[in-house]
Image: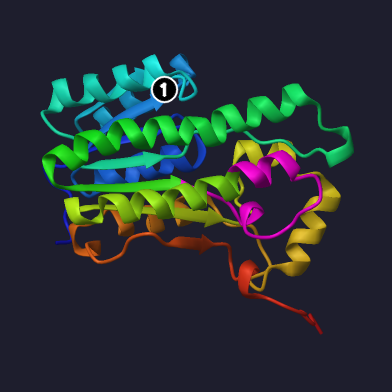
Amino acid sequence: MFSLEGHTAIVTGGASGIGLATGRALAGCGANVVVADIDEEAGARAAEGLSADGADARFVRADVADANDVDAMVEATVTRFGSLEILMHFAGIGMERHALDTTREEWDRILAVNLTGTFLVMQAAGAAMVEAGYGRIVSMASVAGERGGTGRTAYGASKGGVAAMTRVMALEWARHGVTVNTLAPGAIDTALVKKMHDAETRRAYLQAIPMGRYGVPEEVASAAVCLALPASSYITGITLPVDGGFASSGVIKRD
C-alpha cells in the first residue's frame, strides 16, 4: 500500500523544478519514471540522472499542447513498460501581467499549455488507466486559481480551470479505480517562480505566508507522491494546497 514497486509514472515537466523533484521521489519509492518535457537536453539529463541512481527511467520529448505528442508519449510509455499507473502532469508556463496589458496572444498561449494541455494529457493517460481499471492522476493547479492575485488574469484562469477539470474527471473515472487530484502550490522556489516573482511580489507573499518562507520543490513532490500511493485509494477530486498556510491565513501580526 505504501510502495510503488512495479508502477510506471509519467511526469510531464519532469526536466526541472517540481517535476524533477517528483520524478526523483517516485523513483525512490520504486516506480519506473518517464520524464516528459519539451526541453530535450534537460529532459535527457534528468532521465540519465534517475537511471544513474538505479531507477528504470527514460525521456520522451512532448509538447503537452500538441495532441499528437501527447498520444505518442502515452503509447511509448505503455509499449516500453507494459502499463501506466501514475500520471504527474506538471508541465506549464507562467506570466505576471495586468488584465489591461494582457494580449490575446499571451492569453491564448497560457490557456493552450496550462489548460488545454492538461486536458489532452489527462484524457490520454486516463483512457489507458480506465481500460486497466487502476490509476493515480495528479495535476498542477495553483493558489492563483483559488484566490485573486495581481497580474494573474490568464494564469489564474488557466489554473482555476485545471481544478474544475480535475473534479469532473475524478467523478467520471471513480468507478474505474482511477483517482484524480490536483495540487495548489503557493510560492515555491522554482526557476519559473524566480522569473515571475519580482521583489514586491516576494515581499507580498512572505507577509501572507504563516511559515514566513517560500517552499521548495521537494515539499510539493512529497504531497504528489502521497496521492500516487495505492493507499490513497479513497482520496479523489480534491485540490490540495501546498503553500505554507497561505490559503488558510488572514491577518498576520509578526510582532
User: At 25% from the left edge and 66% from the top edge, which residue is drawn?
Assistant: 234
Indicate whether 8 appears above or below 4.
Answer: above
Residue 242 visible from this viewpoint: yes
Horizontal and vertical percent position of residue 205: 74, 60
Horizontal and vertical percent position of residue 178: 23, 50
Is 39 on the left-hand or right-hand side of 197? left
The quadrant of the picture occupied by the C terminus is: bottom right
Indicate whether 77 appears above or below 146.
Answer: above
Is 203 on the left-hand or right-hand side of 18? right
Amino acid type for the residue under numbered disc 1: Gly
User: At 62% from the left edge and 74% from the top edge, which residue is drawn?
Assistant: 248
Horizontal and vertical percent position of residue 47: 33, 26
User: At 32% from the left edge and 46% from the top edge, which residue is drawn?
Assistant: 137
Task: Assess whether residue 131 is covered by the magenta stretch.
Answer: no
Task: Assess whether residue 143 is covered by the magenta stretch.
Answer: yes
Q: Please report the bounds of the magenta region as a residue range.
A: 140-158
Name the residue carrying label 1. Answer: 43
Residue 225 visible from this viewpoint: no
**Dividing the picture into quarters, in which one does residue 71 lie?**
top left
Indicate whether 148 appears above or below 58.
Answer: below
Horizontal and vertical percent position of residue 129: 20, 40
Q: Residues within 10 Å of mark 1 (few under 14, many from 20)?
A: many
Count all numbered tags in the image, as a single digit.
Answer: 1
Rendered image coloring scheme: rainbow
Q: Nearer the viewer, residue 85 or 161?
A: 161
Farthest-out residue, right: 100
User: At 51% from the left edge and 39% from the top edge, which residue is drawn?
Assistant: 17
Is 179 on the left-hand or right-hand side of 213? left
The quadrant of the picture occupied by the N terminus is: bottom left
Q: Secondary structure at mark 1?
A: helix
